């Protein structure tokens, strides 16, 4: 009895700033076509706006800015990937989400934490002639929170009187 014991996982593949990227499908709540967003009360260069999804206010982040990639224009097929999270959902703006694929864990080339795209790429996979960056939503969320804290400290610096 022979069988393939290699573990395979499903990934959602999408594009950000012309780069193919993927995340574990199990971390995705849903994918939404670009919708009208409300303005966020928090003004930061990483926030595109707020998505009303069934009455839930979901912050939508500019994934390219968190990753340190170039800006791009929203298009007809731009998508928001809504990620599952322990405390709340977050949306990530992408140029397009275009397929789901399965990859064996043995086929992933793992990267040391913090080594690429602001530490948000955890691995690389080759599919045909294309290299796909496997992103970590946990790292992306951490970078976003760091950006918000930095933005808040610059907007509201401590003074001697406040200390």
Image: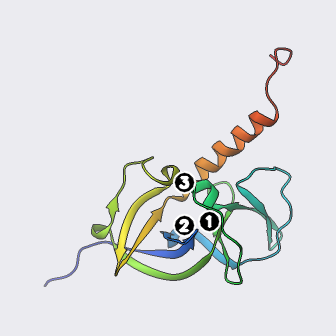
Of 43 and 138, the residue lying toward us? 43
Q: Is residue 84 left or right of residue 125?
A: right
Place of residue 72 in the rendered image (x, y in percent of width and height, measured from the top left): 66, 68
Q: Is residue 78 left or right of residue 12?
A: right
Of 75 and 57, the residue lying toward us? 75
Q: Is residue 71 left or right of residue 123?
A: right
Q: In which quarter of the image is residue 127?
A: bottom left
Q: Is the residue 111 above or below the residue 125 in the image? A: above
First in sequence: mark 2 vs mark 3: 2
Residue at the spot of label 3: 138
User: Is the residue under label 2 in contact with that under label 1 (CB below 8 Å)?
Assistant: yes
User: Is the residue under label 3 in contact with that under label 2 (CB below 8 Å)?
Assistant: no
The local secondary structure at tag 3 comes to helix
Crowd rating for badge 3 (residues with CA inside 10 Å; few <14, some 14–19, many 20+): few
Residue at the spot of label 2: 27
Place of residue 97 in the rendered image (x, y in percent of width and height, measured from the top left): 58, 78
Q: Which residue is drawn at 70% across and 39% down?
A: 149
The local secondary structure at tag 1 comes to strand
Q: Is the residue 24 above or below the residue 98 in the image? A: above
Q: Residue at x 67, y 83 (%)?
A: 77
Q: Is the residue 66 above or below the residue 102 in the image? A: above
Q: Quadrant of residue 65?
A: bottom right
Label 1 to label 2: alpha-carbon separation:
6 Å
First in sequence: mark 3 vs mark 1: 1
Place of residue 83 in the rendered image (x, y in percent of width and height, measured from the top left): 62, 65
Of 70 and 90, the residue lying toward us? 70
First in sequence: mark 1 vs mark 2: 2
Residue at the spot of label 1: 83
């Amino acid at each position: 009895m022979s069988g393939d014991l290699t573990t395979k996982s499903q990934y959602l593949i999408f594009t950000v700033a012309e780069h193919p990227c993927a995340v574990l499908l199990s971390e995705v709540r849903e994918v939404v076509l670009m919708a009208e967003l409300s303005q966020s009360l928090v003004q930061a260069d990483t926030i595109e706006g707020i998505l009303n999804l069934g009455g839930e206010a979901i912050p939508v982040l500019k994934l390219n800015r968190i990753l340190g990639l170039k800006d791009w224009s929203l298009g007809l097929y731009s998508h928001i990937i809504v990620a599952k999270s322990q405390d709340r959902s977050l949306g990530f703006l992408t140029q397009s989400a275009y397929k789901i694929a399965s990859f064996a864990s043995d086929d992933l080339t793992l990267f040391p934490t913090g080594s690429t795209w602001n530490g948000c790429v955890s691995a690389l996979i080759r599919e045909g002639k294309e290299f796909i960056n496997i992103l970590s939503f946990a790292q992306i969320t951490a970078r976003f929170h760091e950006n918000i804290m930095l933005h808040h400290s610059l907007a509201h610096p401590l003074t001697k009187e406040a200390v």
